[in-house]
Image: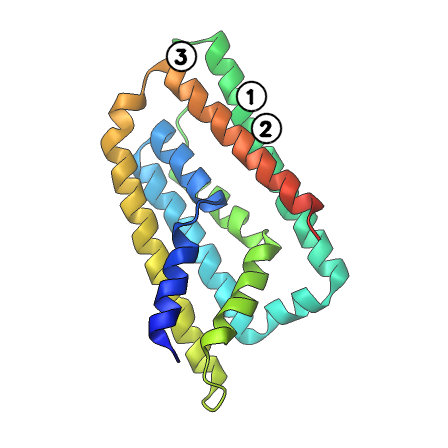
Amino acid sequence: MDLGAFFLVSLAVIVVPGVDMALVTRQVLLHGRRAGVVTVAGLVNGGLLHTAFAVLGLSALLAASATAFTVLRYVGAGYLLYLGASSLLAARRARDEPDVAPAPVSLERAYRTALLTNLTNPKVAVFFLTFLPQFVDPDRPVGPQTAVLSVAFMAMATAWLLGYVALLGRVRHVLQRPSVRRRIEQVSGVVLVGMGLRLATEH
């Protein structure tokens, strides 16, 4: 295993903004650091499940079945569209009722949202299926190597996202004005809807 190349490429992949960072940003700025940490836990557990699927060969079956992949792609896109629409509706309510604070989110719901967002995204499954084998030594047992690389990747992702949560937590108090909260909901909604539409239309 070329661990040096693996860590460099993994770091580049992890820091690129995506659905995970959009969810974390929204939860921390609107609901606080604890909601952000729980969101990270949901995302990471979803990622670990995807890596387990890759090790067991289930991701390969998904990628090989056009029907299964398409169904999961539309489910994932629909869920992102739902989350985005919810954010846009919340932004509209915040505009109509500027003095009303956003409804608190339960930690269970924050975790479930992150977990389902990750699990219903087939691109995550295909990513682990195609990314990890590039760093596996074919002359050694593949399963243990894939498991080690999976855990290492998720550990790096966890560290990055928790650091991001801590950073957002430090500036959250500056962003509590109603107009800023509304803008956060609007931007989050647009980003999530855009990602949902992209997932639905990609082939």
**Quadrant housing the N terminus:** bottom left
Q: Name above or below for residue 54 compared with residue 203.
A: below
Please state the horizontal and vertical placement of residue 136, each as a whole percent of the image: 46, 79
Proximity of marks 2 and 1: CB atoms separated by less than 8 Å: yes
Q: CA distance from mark 3 to mark 1?
A: 14 Å
Q: Residues within 10 Å of mark 2 (few under 14, many from 20)?
A: some
Does residue 8 appear in this view?
yes
Report which residue position mark 2 lands on: 85
Say the numbered circle drawn on residue 89.
1
Could you say which quadrant of the image residue 153 lies in? bottom left
Could you say which quadrant of the image residue 166 lies in? top left
Q: Nearer the viewer, residue 130 or 89?
A: 130
Proximity of marks 3 and 1: CB atoms separated by less than 8 Å: no
Please state the horizontal and vertical placement of residue 61, each as a whole percent of the image: 67, 70
Q: Name above or below for residue 142 compared with residue 65.
A: below
Q: Nearer the viewer, mark 2 or mark 3?
A: 2
Q: Name above or below for residue 86 compared with residue 16.
A: above
Disc 3, SS = loop
Q: Residue at x 45, y 89 (%)?
A: 140
Report which residue position mark 3 lands on: 100
* Numbered marks: total: 3
The single residue placed furthest to the bottom in the displayed view is 139
Q: CA distance from mark 2 to mark 1?
A: 6 Å
Say the numbered circle drawn on residue 43.
none
The single residue placed furthest to the left in the displayed view is 170
Please state the horizontal and vertical placement of residue 113, each as a whole percent of the image: 49, 42
Disc 1, SS = helix
